[in-house]
Image (cartoon, helix red, strand yellow):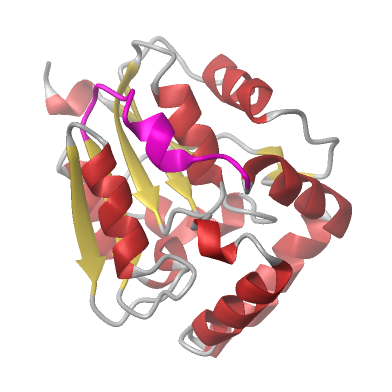
Amino acid sequence: MAASRVGFVLVPGLGLDERSSRRLRGRLAATVVPLPGMGLAAPVPPLEVLADRLLDGLGEGPVVLVGHSQSCQVVAVAAGRDTRVAGIVLLGPTTEPRLRSAWGLARHWLATALGEPWWQVPLIVAQWWRTGPRAMAALWRVAAPDDTDRRLAHVRVPVAVVRGTRDRLCGHGWAARLASAAPGGRLVELPGAAHMTPQTHPDAVASVMRSF
């Protein structure tokens, strides 16, 4: 299979939309598939239905699915259900079991936010406003309890888990656990990056994507 024939499909993270990957898509061609809670202010169905909607948005394939943050859980489900998926990239995948409590999430989110460039704030807030708190909260309730490592054990395509070294929402231990759970998994850590790697480190992320 020629690498040039593989397409890339991006799924925004929690509350984000296509603007979160604009700089990344300036480096390589990719399609964005927004979903409820991830760019769409719409009722959030179960995780399996979200995965079906993602797969409905694919072309003939083959494709590499690229998830960010909480959309990685949707990508992990979809990858195990369709032969068009040639590989997956998980950018800062959530949710580590110890962060499923409101206190754990808030504490690590704040620590991560302090490691992000402040120029992002208006862009992120604008995306959250568009998606809306209701859809974001609903997505959290649907996706957070799912065991991503269990899902990845059934994925039979190459998997790259990418995290920033300053990302407290996706710590080294959790990222390494996910990479080892997938039969074809590998861990890539980006020095100095935090959680918003598609926006802050588009060249490095594009390099990982091209490796497929």
Asked if one can make out residue 6 in the rendered structure from this viewpoint, the answer is yes
Quadrant into which the N terminus falls: top left
Q: Main secondary structure of the magenta part?
A: loop
In the picture, residue 142 is in which quadrant? top right
Depth order, front residue of 161/211: 161
- 53 above or below 212? above
Q: Residue at x 46, y 44 (%)?
A: 67
- 46 above or below 96? above
Q: Residue at x 25, y 21 (%)?
A: 156
Depth order, front residue of 209/98: 98
Residue 193: x and y in percent read: 34, 76
Quadrant into which the C terminus falls: top left
> What span is in magenta?
145-158
- 13 above or below 49? below
Q: Is residue 38 left or right of residue 149?
A: right
Residue found farthest to the left: 2
Residue 115: x and y in percent read: 46, 87
Magenta-span inclusion, residue 107: no
Magenta-span inclusion, residue 153: yes
Q: Residue at x 64, y 38 (%)?
A: 34
Q: Residue at x 39, y 41 (%)?
A: 149
Q: Is residue 65 left or right of residue 15?
A: left
Residue 187: x and y in percent read: 21, 54
Residue 161: x and y in percent read: 29, 51
Q: Is residue 107 left or right of residue 208?
A: right
Q: Is residue 134 left or right of residue 194?
A: right
- 83 above or below 17? above
